[in-house]
């Protein structure tokens, strides 16, 4: 069976989360008199992403949105940076930083090319409202928003990829996960669920040149960016 749908990891693959979070938090906290390494703050928050979701994946807690996971982890980040006593309204505004991310430069041109041949959907751990906001912010479009919210679980569990394929009435092998090349756990999870996998080089996800561009797991395609992927897919 040929590939009919492309499923996109969002954070790091489509979205430059590190720059977006750092700038958003700085915009909120700097006028309040705080001065810190904003990128270090973003990195610290992101580092708690996996452990926060593991509570759900393990079955220890019921499914909650990624917004809720981020909010729980934000308390820990604030404590580590010795920031205390902020009003709830400010904390919620900081938490919405993940809704204000921008796409990598190749995305706006490449997605319409890919859309000419394939169904497109985010298959992300982000909740639907978060994806809707970043999609509108960046003026990009997809055929659906799939992933954690419809599966009620988090990647890399197989149900997330399989439920996304089912939503398009497709078999897993008719779907391809498009992921940053350093996201080995995500790519391995997708392949184990029966999907094809395309790895995209995103060397700057964790800072200039700091992210690996060589997958450590088998992939079906490797591309420099989304335009290169479109070229390889013949669109």
Image (cartoon, rainbow, N blue to C red):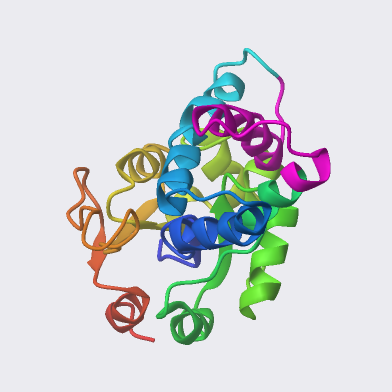
Q: Position of residue 35 (x, y in %)?
A: 51, 50
* 70 or 139, nearer to the observer: 70
Q: Quadrant of the N terminus?
A: bottom left
Q: Quadrant of residue 200?
A: bottom left
| Residue at 50%, 71% in the rendered image | 103
Q: Is residue 94 above or below residue 158?
A: below
* 221 or 11, nearer to the observer: 11
Q: Quadrant of the C terminus?
A: bottom left
Q: Position of residue 208 (x, y in %)?
A: 26, 63
Q: Is residue 127 visible to us here? A: no
| Residue at 26%, 64% in the rendered image | 201
Q: Which residues are magenta?
A: 62-91
| Residue at 19%, 43% in the rendered image | 216
In the rendered view, does 99 fall on the left or right side of 222? right
Q: Kindly give the residue lying farthest to the top in the view shown.
A: 60
- The secondary structure making up most of the magenta span is helix
| Residue at 52%, 44% in the rendered image | 161
Q: Position of residue 176 (x, y in %)?
A: 42, 58
In the rendered view, does 73 fall on the left or right side of 149? left
The magenta stretch spans residue 81: yes
The magenta stretch spans residue 110: no
Q: Quadrant of residue 71?
A: top right
Q: Position of residue 107 (x, y in %)?
A: 46, 77
Q: Is residue 52 above or below residue 113?
A: above
């Amino acid at each position: 069976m040929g590939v009919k749908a492309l499923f996109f990891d969002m954070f790091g693959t489509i979205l430059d989360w590190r720059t977006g979070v750092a700038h958003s938090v700085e915009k909120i906290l700097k006028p309040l008199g705080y001065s810190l390494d904003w990128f270090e703050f973003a990195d610290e928050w992101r580092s708690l992403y996996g452990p926060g979701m593991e509570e759900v994946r393990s079955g220890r807690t019921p499914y909650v949105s990624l917004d809720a996971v981020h909010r729980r982890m934000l308390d820990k980040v604030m404590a580590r940076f010795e920031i205390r006593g902020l009003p709830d309204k400010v904390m919620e505004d900081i938490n919405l930083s993940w809704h204000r991310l921008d796409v990598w430069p190749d995305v706006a041109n490449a997605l319409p090319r890919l859309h000419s041949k394939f169904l497109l959907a985010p298959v992300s751990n982000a909740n639907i409202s978060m994806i809707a906001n970043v999609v509108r912010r960046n003026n990009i479009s997809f055929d659906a928003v799939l992933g954690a919210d419809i599966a009620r679980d988090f990647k890399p569990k197989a149900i997330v990829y399989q439920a996304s394929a089912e939503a398009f009435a497709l078999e897993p092998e008719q779907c391809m996960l498009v992921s940053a090349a350093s996201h080995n756990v995500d790519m391995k999870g997708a392949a184990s669920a029966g999907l094809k996998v395309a790895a995209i080089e995103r060397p700057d996800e964790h800072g200039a040149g700091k992210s690996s561009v060589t997958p450590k797991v088998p992939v079906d395609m490797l591309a420099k960016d989304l335009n290169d992927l479109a070229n390889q897919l013949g669109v």
